[in-house]
Image (cartoon, helix red, strand yellow):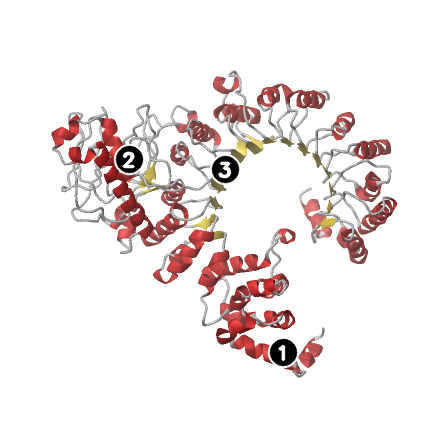
Amino acid sequence: RSVAEAAMAAERPRSLFALSAAAVSRSMAALERDVWALPGHLLRGLLPLLTIFHLERAEDAARRAGLSTQPIWRKLWDDVMKTRPPNSESITCWRKKFLETFFSNVLHGVLDVSSDWRLHDRHFSPLLHSSPHVSQLTLCNMLQGAVELTAEHNHRVLENLAASLRVLKFQHLLSCDQSIRRSLVLLLHRLIHHGSVSQVSMCSWPVHDTVLLVLILTMSAGFWRSGNALACHSSPCGLCREEDKAQSQQSAQEGAERGCDAEWEGSGAENQKRSPKVADACMTSVLSGPRSPPLQNPELLCEETSSEVPCGNQGGSSPHSSSGQLSCHPIPRKTRRWQKPAVGRKRRCLRRSRGHYADPEDLYDFVFTVAREDNSGLLDKTRTTEGENTENWTSSSPGSPCTGHAGCKRRGGPAGTLSLKAAHRFRSVSTLELFSIPLTGETCRTLSNLLSSWVSLENLVLSYNGLNANISCILSGLRALSRHPECRFRVLRVSDMFSHMPCMELVRCALSALPQLRTLSVSFDLKNQLEGSRPEASPSCSEAEIPESCLEVLEIRFPREPLHTALLLPVLKASKSLQQLSLDSATLPCPQELGHLLEVLKECTPNLRKLSFHDVNLAEHQKEVLLLLQDPGLQEITFSFCRLFESSTAEFLSEIINTVKRNSSLKSLKLPGNRLGNHRLVALADIFSEDSSSSLCQLDVSSNCIKPDGLLEFTKKLEGHIQQRGGQLPFTQLHLFQNWLDQDAETAQEALRRLRALCSVVNDAWDSSQAFADYISVM
């Protein structure tokens, strides 16, 4: 409508119902219970006039009346957010989508709630009301969101997030001061250690703060040295206090049953005579919480001493220590002292000033690292030097899981590490993702040591981290993790700009180290620029036979490397459970290579259901393409940008159609980027003719130079086949991304309208002229 028409409509008198509904909306605080009891036809007209807070509370009443609030939330999104969300077709609940985005925008100051009357109500807090709907949260820049969420007035908001949040993301982080870092520690402790966060992702941090990065990694792994950060906030963690109280009571009861208490009360000499296993068993329940499996035989750390002088291990004996604050609160003052028998290595106690609490700054003068467990099950001892700069950090102790590799050589420098024996082991996340964060050798060693005992970790994604030789360090930590009886690790995805070793070599190494892996994805853009710097094949990976693996999904993106079936053969032989194989950007060294690959797949992978080729030139492999299309075991086949029809004839297209028509097991055929054009698309409609036995449900013809008139002709032909088959058609989804449908908008809209009556259509608003201009500009 024109501006004049809109103004006239605004001047028209409103109906009595509209006036009454507006009055009720303004008085919802008093009338809410009565409103929910209204009949459906009245409630339908009232719902759009409510604020988001009352609209959210009206969900149950609307459901009882047979009404849906989804259209109202969708309109709210369009009016307030004014953007089209990515993958909007897959959004099933616009209420959750709106409130989750609303929470994030309000938290970061992006959205002014006073800009729309529907967004504010003096009876409701925007953050508190929307927080139960937040399952994913992103913190950016200076972590202002972390500071706000840990403020006292947002205590209930944080409690709601602890129950609802599943994914915590960090993006474009900047260095921050100690107070902000403390807020982050409290946030991570509540959301991960005592919450429901199962995935931590960090991305786009090209110049990262090493101390902050390692702090996030360490707490994500479930380690935290409690006490200092919470002490300075004068509000100890109540959950830790309750759990430690229960744990202490349980430990005291168990100790009494074993006669342990009597020995605790004895002298130091008597304590030294007792069995180390009994002593360690008594300490295990104190140093570890009920949230995760306890550390094996942890040593007692001298966390507080009565002197500033370090009590180093002299003459091979351990120093006396008094138990300090091992959790978020003081342990009852019945202090017990004991001596642990020497284990043959030197150790230092952490220096502490006099008084009950240490300096709250201490926590951030060190970087947490995980020391390995040696054969005796004791944690390695690390040293701490107080007052050193936070940049002075190192990772593992000698003999850690990542030593012995070219990428893991230990660099000199003072040790600035904090032994994690001083930390409790809490709940940890199951998914870790690192995108575009450069990882140095030191950081990789720290991550490797964390991985070696991260038993809850199931998925690890490392993308564009510049690992190079340090990939060996990461695999070393994962190898140590795989030996743990409670290891759950199943998915590894590694992608980078340059490949340090051939792709197949890395695949072999990963499967040899991780036989329980279910999904392995290896992706590189380019070969290493310095070809001479590429290491020769490691005998441990190349010559050793790959153990039988549980691999189900294998994805390899070659940096324009030749695909040698002989190198892939041992991997496929060891992967009898393989169900999905994806080969990307590989070159075929000889015409027979693809044929050899198909023979190997048929022989070694009886369970293979999905096969994908992307950016692999198959123009001269028409015979092999037809063999794949008639394979009765495959349910999904992808030929993406494979130049299928570059040198083919019309007979090849007919053979493809007839082969698919006879294959009743194929469910999905994806042909993006193969220059189908209009005439080939129209021909593909014959797959669904009356004489076809095809069960094809999904067809992807994205990026195929399809124009509106060709799409309309395809639609008409498809309608004819459906009519001949009595309206029965298995075809349910058509993908049309990045085609030339903008060249005739009217025809395109008619074709899409008629197509949507037959199946689900997934497309986008793509500007073909701009894409062509971009193509010309880079020629």
Categorize mark 3 by other alpha carbons within 10 Å: few (<14), some (14-19), many (20+): some
Label 3, on which residue?
A: 459
Amino acid type, label 1: Ala
In this view, the residue farthest toward the top is 543
Q: Residues within 10 Å of mark 2 (few under 14, many from 20)?
A: some
- The answer to whether residue 171 is above or below residue 309 is below
Q: Who's the residue at 52% across and 61% down the image?
A: 102
45 to 306, vertically: above or below:
below
Element under label 1? Answer: helix
Residue 379: which quarter of the image? top left
Q: Quadrant of residue 413?
A: top left
Report which quarter residue 429 is drawn in.
top left
Whichever of callouts 3 and 1 sits on the residue coming sooner in the sequence is: 1
State which mark lies toward you, 2 or 3: 2
Question: What residue is drawn where x is 47% and y is 63%?
Answer: 129
Distance between mark 1 and mark 2 Cα atoms: 67 Å
Compare marks 1 and 2 and give the one earlier in the sequence: 1
Query: Is label 1 in contact with label 2 (beta carbons under 8 Å)?
Result: no
Residue contact at pointers 3 and 1, CB within 8 angstroms: no
Q: Which mark is residue 18?
A: 1
Residue 562 percent location from the top left of the image:
64, 25
Q: Amino acid at mark 3?
A: Asn
The three-letter amino acid code for the residue at tag 2 is Thr
Which disc, if any, is residue 284? Answer: 2
Nearer the viewer's eye, disc 3 or disc 1?
A: 1
Q: Position of residue 594 (x, y in %)?
A: 70, 24
In this view of the protein, which residue sits in the foreground, 374 or 680?
374
Which quarter of the rendered picture does the C terminus lie within? top right
**Horizontal and vertical percent position of residue 195:** 41, 49
